Amino acid sequence: LVAEIEKKITEAFEVFDREANKTVDVREIGCIVRSLGCFPNEAEVQELLAKIEVEEPGGFVHLEKFLPVMTEVLLDRRFRPIPEDVILHAFEALDENKCGYITQEDLVKHLTEE
C-alpha cells in the first residue's frame, strides 16, 4: 500500500518538475496536493510546507522531503474532499436560472466579480 501511495505521489510531483531534477517550485505544492485528491485550504498548505524542508524561503521543494510528509497525509486521509451535497448546494446557488448548468460567462462573472 505504501509503495503504491509513494508511486502516485511521485507521479504527481513529476508533472510539476519542469527541470526533471526532483524539485518543484514551492508555489506548486498546493496544486500537487490537490491533484492527489486532498483539498487543504491555504493555511493547511502552509502547515504542510512547515513540515517540509524548503530550500530558502520561496524556493524549491525536493521530492525526498515531500514524499514522506505527503505519504503520511494520504495514509491518514487528511484533507478530504468537500461533501458532494455541499458542492451541489454551491452549484445550485450559482445556477440562477435553475437550468442545470452554468455558462462559461456566468462562471467567469461569479469568480471575478462576486
Image: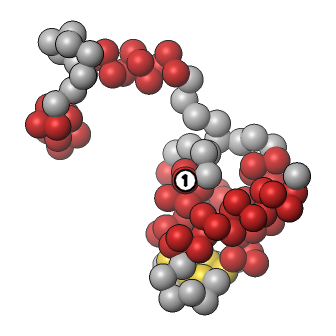
Q: Position of residue 95 (x, y in %)?
A: 23, 18
Looking at the picture, does residue 29 appear above or below residue 21?
above
In this view of the protein, which residue sits in the foreground, 92 or 45? 92
Residue count near mark 1 (Cα–Cα under 10 Å), binned few <14, some 14–19, many ≥20: few
Number of numbered discs on residues: 1
Q: Residue furthest top?
A: 98
Looking at the picture, does residue 41 appear above or below residue 93?
below
Mark 1 lies on residue: 35
Looking at the picture, does residue 19 appear above or below residue 35?
below
Q: Quadrant of residue 103?
A: top left
In this view of the protein, which residue sits in the foreground, 60 or 96? 96
Q: Quadrant for the C terminus, please.
A: top left
Q: Position of residue 13 (x, y in %)?
A: 61, 69
Q: Is residue 108 left or right of residue 81?
A: left
Viewer can see residue 26: no
**Colouring of the image:** secondary structure
Q: Quadrant of residue 38?
A: top right
Residue at the spot 20% in from the left edge and 13% down from the top edge: 99
Q: Is residue 106 left or right of residue 51?
A: left
Residue at the spot 88% in from the left edge and 52% down from the top edge: 1
Residue at the spot 60% in from the left edge and 82% down from the top edge: 23
Q: Is residue 55 left or right of residue 99?
A: right
Task: Check disc 1 and give the amino acid type.
Answer: Ser
Q: Quadrant of residue 6?
A: bottom right
